[in-house]
Image: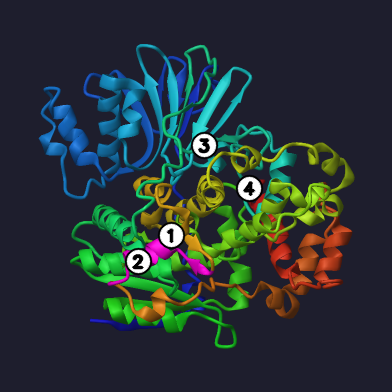
């Protein structure tokens, strides 16, 4: 029965702290005598022992959850191996998942990768050949970082685990891209010598550490089906898939949590969970005080409709400020999104009632959310060819983030700007693809904002909170189907995500289906003025600031004093820069 279990102020979470789990590291070649490893064989070593196949030929490290583990175990049984004891309803054991990959790899090698459906980041070592493989899932729900230098290779699931071996030098191009997007896109990280494996990629090193070309075992491609079919037809097709995915993502026999904003995406996930789960459902919402706009009216409407136990967390400005450094310490790369702190605090709250937390992330990039509209308008009202800067699709795409792209020549110090100004953007190839224009934008958002911002944030912060985060709308099958739906059924005029609305039409109140998206806005513009200005000046304008070698602090002073803030954007920019500064401080400790 529906109830509001609690209205809680985030001050009550003061004693909560991140769950610091040491990330595993795998190293190969030229190991140092002073280094201590939990497992070592010849020139390969690791901080945790690997999981082996039954024959002892393939070793696997990493993190994995597979939604299709049972049929894969059955596939192995067809090869004469008695694995029936492994097949469980929930398929949630990471150890069994690693063993499953080891057995599949021994028989089929990297040809088994397209069969894996779920979330994973893996390192696979072939004892006979000495080859080491790095593998990441198709959507990028889990992360994998590596550092290759001077005849050594070190790989970890979290970038901070590589801190003892990295140089500490900042990658100027990654810095530029962060200031444009509020996250670091592509294989670069903020550290010059650390790289991130891209989604749907397998990267192999031979025994003598010769790096082979990355192998993409899956490509995000446009393949529109049913062009003449109705919206109802596509909605039913999507609904059938969402029903299947949701049943696989629910933890068998235990309560489930859902982050519920009251928007379409999280409301759809809540309703699907309520339809298929036979255990208690807890939902969690946030607001920033009675004097700030919020969406509690809608989140409580959905909670009541779906009969969940609803929890509401108030986050005042002092808490948001005080928990920022702690939050950034949990992130592999800086993310200048003001919702990072609320995400971590919600995780702390959620772990009291559920171990698996679902979210609605993925609805916008997959089904045509409103953030695509500025680019669609730019395409419709394209400037003349003579206005080359305005006509440049990369410039227009970066401007759609509404961060610091226009400020870069003044914000970056001259020597830094000179290094990066002519380096092509990682987005350029995808912006020039042959997909229809909307699907081109969606593919960009899935590949980069999805993998490098949204899913990395979910993975890092749910791990830190001690819960498991799952994003059903970013499931690889949902992503694939999103590229099969005609663009007119995703974003048509002012109607956003029409096909997703159709898919869950019978599950949600009309007020949720038909409301325009407003998004969860953190009032950073106001709070920098009213509560944080003096403290921010002390941090960002210090001569010893970590950002001082790279950024023009006189411009930051203008922002902090709100000089010339015509569009009311300085608060967002200041949060972006403050997050960068505190992230650097935390990760250089």
Which element is circle 4 on?
Answer: helix
Which numbered disc, 4 or 3, marks the residue that appears first in the sequence? 3
User: Picture coordinates of residue 436 (x, y %)?
Assistant: 53, 47
User: Percent position (x, y) of residue 82?
Assistant: 10, 28
Marks 4 and 1 in Cβ contact (< 8 Å): no
First in sequence: mark 3 or mark 1? 3
* Among numbered discs 4 and 2, the one appearing first in the sequence: 2
Q: Residues within 10 Å of mark 1 (few under 14, many from 20)?
A: many
Label drawn at residue 587: 4
Q: Quadrant of residue 411?
A: bottom right
Residue at left offset 18%, top offset 60%: 253
User: Which label number is shown at residue 489?
Assistant: 1
Residue at screen point 59% across, 56% down:
328
Q: Which x, y percent locates residue 421?
A: 80, 41
User: Residue under circle 3?
Assistant: 198
How far is the residue under mark 1 from the one under mark 2?
10 Å
Label 4 to label 1, Cα distance in Å? 44 Å
Query: Gap in Å between the C-alphas at discs 3 and 1?
Result: 29 Å
In the rendered image, which residue does mark 2 sit on?
Answer: 502
Image: magenta residue range: 494-506
- CB under 8 Å between callouts 1 and 2? yes
Residue 407, by quadrant, is: bottom right
Q: Viewed as shown, does residue 74 lie left or right of 571? A: left
Mark 1 or 2, closer to the camera: 1
The local secondary structure at tag 2 comes to helix
- C-alpha gap between disc 3 and disc 2: 33 Å
Q: Nearer the viewer, residue 504 or 154?
A: 504
């Amino acid at each position: 029965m529906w109830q509001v279990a609690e209205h809680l102020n985030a001050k009550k979470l003061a004693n909560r702290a991140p769950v610091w789990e040491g990330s595993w590291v795998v190293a190969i070649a030229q190991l140092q005598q002073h280094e201590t490893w939990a497992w070592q064989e010849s020139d390969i070593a690791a901080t945790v022992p690997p999981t082996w196949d039954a024959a002892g030929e393939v070793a696997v490290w990493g993190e994995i959850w597979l939604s299709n583990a049972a049929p894969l175990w059955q596939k192995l049984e067809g090869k004469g191996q008695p694995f029936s004891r492994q097949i469980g309803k929930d398929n949630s054991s990471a150890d069994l998942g690693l063993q499953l990959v080891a057995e599949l790899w021994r028989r089929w090698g990297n040809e088994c990768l397209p069969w894996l459906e779920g979330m994973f980041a893996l390192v696979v070592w072939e004892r006979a050949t000495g080859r080491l493989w790095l593998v990441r899932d198709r959507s990028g729900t889990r992360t994998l970082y590596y550092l290759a230098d001077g005849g050594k290779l070190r790989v970890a699931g979290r970038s901070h685990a590589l801190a003892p071996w990295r140089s500490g030098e900042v990658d100027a191009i990654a810095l530029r891209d962060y200031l444009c997007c509020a996250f670091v896109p592509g294989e670069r990280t903020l550290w010059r010598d650390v790289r991130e494996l891209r989604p749907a990629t397998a990267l192999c090193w031979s025994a003598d550490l010769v790096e082979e070309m990355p192998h993409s075992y899956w490509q995000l491609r446009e393949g529109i089906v049913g062009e003449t079919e109705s919206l109802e037809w596509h909605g039913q097709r999507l609904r059938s898939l969402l029903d299947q995915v949701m049943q696989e993502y629910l933890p068998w026999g235990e309560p489930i949590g859902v982050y519920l904003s009251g928007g379409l995406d999280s409301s759809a996930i809540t309703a699907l969970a309520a339809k298929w789960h036979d255990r208690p459902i807890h939902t969690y919402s946030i607001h920033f005080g009675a004097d700030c706009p919020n969406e509690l009216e809608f989140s409580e409407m959905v909670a009541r409709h779906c009969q969940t136990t609803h929890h509401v967390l108030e986050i005042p400005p002092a808490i948001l400020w005080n928990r920022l450094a702690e939050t950034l310490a949990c992130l592999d790369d800086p993310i200048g999104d003001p919702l990072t702190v609320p995400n971590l605090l919600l995780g702390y709250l959620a772990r009291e009632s559920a171990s698996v937390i679902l979210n609605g992330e993925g609805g916008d990039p997959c089904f045509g959310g409103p953030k695509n509209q500025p680019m669609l308008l730019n395409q419709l009202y394209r400037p003349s060819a003579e206005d080359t800067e305005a006509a440049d699709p990369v410039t227009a795409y970066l401007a759609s983030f509404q961060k610091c792209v226009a400020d870069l020549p003044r914000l970056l110090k001259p020597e830094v700007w000179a290094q990066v100004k002519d380096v092509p953007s990682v987005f350029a190839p995808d912006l020039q693809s042959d997909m229809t224009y909307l699907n081109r934008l969606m593919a960009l958002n899935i590949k980069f904002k999805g993998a490098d911002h949204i899913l990395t944030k979910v993975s890092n912060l749910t791990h830190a909170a001690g819960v498991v985060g799952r994003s059903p709308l970013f499931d690889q099958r949902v992503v694939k189907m999103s590229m099969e739906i005609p663009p007119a059924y995703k974003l048509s005029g002012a109607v956003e995500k029409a096909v997703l609305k159709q898919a869950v039409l019978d599950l949600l109140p009309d007020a949720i289906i038909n409301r325009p998206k407003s998004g969860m806005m953190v009032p950073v513009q106001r709070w920098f003025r009213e509560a944080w200005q003096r403290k921010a000046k002390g941090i960002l304008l210090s001569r010893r600031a970590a950002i001082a070698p790279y950024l023009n602090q006189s411009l930051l002073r203008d922002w902090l004093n709100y000089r010339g803030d015509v569009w009311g954007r300085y608060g967002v920019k200041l949060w972006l820069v403050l997050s960068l500064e505190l992230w650097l401080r935390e990760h250089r400790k």
